[in-house]
Amino acid sequence: MRRILIDEARRKARGKHGGGLRRVELPDLPAEVGDDRADDLIALDAALTALAAYDPVKAQVVNLRYFAGLTNEEAAECLGMSPATAKRHWTVARAWLYRRISAQESGNP
């Protein structure tokens, strides 16, 4: 599911598909409503790839929770760990991803 969302976000970001333009479906919507989700998904993918290189288990927890929509207990069962451990991984991974994405947005790698 992650690959599908990321590929779609990258496709929409290309100039050929109106990459820099904002989409407004209804004429009565304000101009600031757009498709910013594509940029967010691309930033998340880059940060998640870096997290997978640093700690693959935490990246798997994020994939299961965010992209597959599993609960903490379901993700823990899939990965063969306790729900408490999955919750700790989820908390640390979210903080790590937030810091990484914030650094990318501010221009610091």
Image: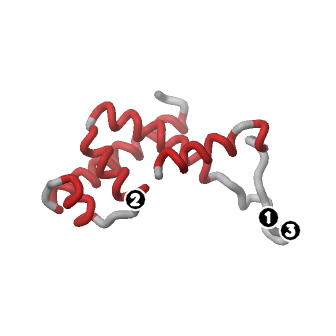
Query: Is 59 left, or right, of 47 in this rendering?
Result: left
Q: Which badge, 2 or 1, is on the more N-terminal residue?
A: 1
Q: Nearer the viewer, residue 63 or 106?
A: 63
Q: Residue at x 37, y 51 (%)?
A: 63
The crowd level at tag 2 (other Cα within 10 Å; few <14, some 14-19, many 20+) is few
- The amino acid on which the numbered mark 3 sits, given as a three-letter code, is Pro
| Lower position in the chain sequence, tag 2 or tag 3 | 3
Residue shown at 78%/44% (left/top)? 18
How far is the residue under mark 2 from the one under mark 3? 34 Å
Which picture quadrant has residue 49?
top left
Q: Amino acid at mark 1?
A: Glu
Residue drawn 35% across the image and 58% down it: 65
Find the distance from the CA under tag 2 to the CA under tag 1: 28 Å
Task: Tell me the residue at 54%/38% (across/down).
Answer: 105
User: Of residues 51 and 75, which is closer to you in this image?
Assistant: 75
Which residue carries the number 2 mark? 68
Query: Mark 1 = which residue?
Result: 25
Which residue, as the protein is rendered here, is positioned at the far left? 82
Instruction: From the top left corner, tell me how far across and down residue 45 is, in percent.
Output: 47, 41
The amino acid sitting under disc 2 is Ala
Q: Nearer the viewer, residue 19 or 106?
A: 19
Label 2 element class: loop
In the picture, the disc for residue 27 is 3
Position of residue 61 in the picture relative to residue 5 (left or right): left
Q: Secondary structure at mark 3?
A: loop
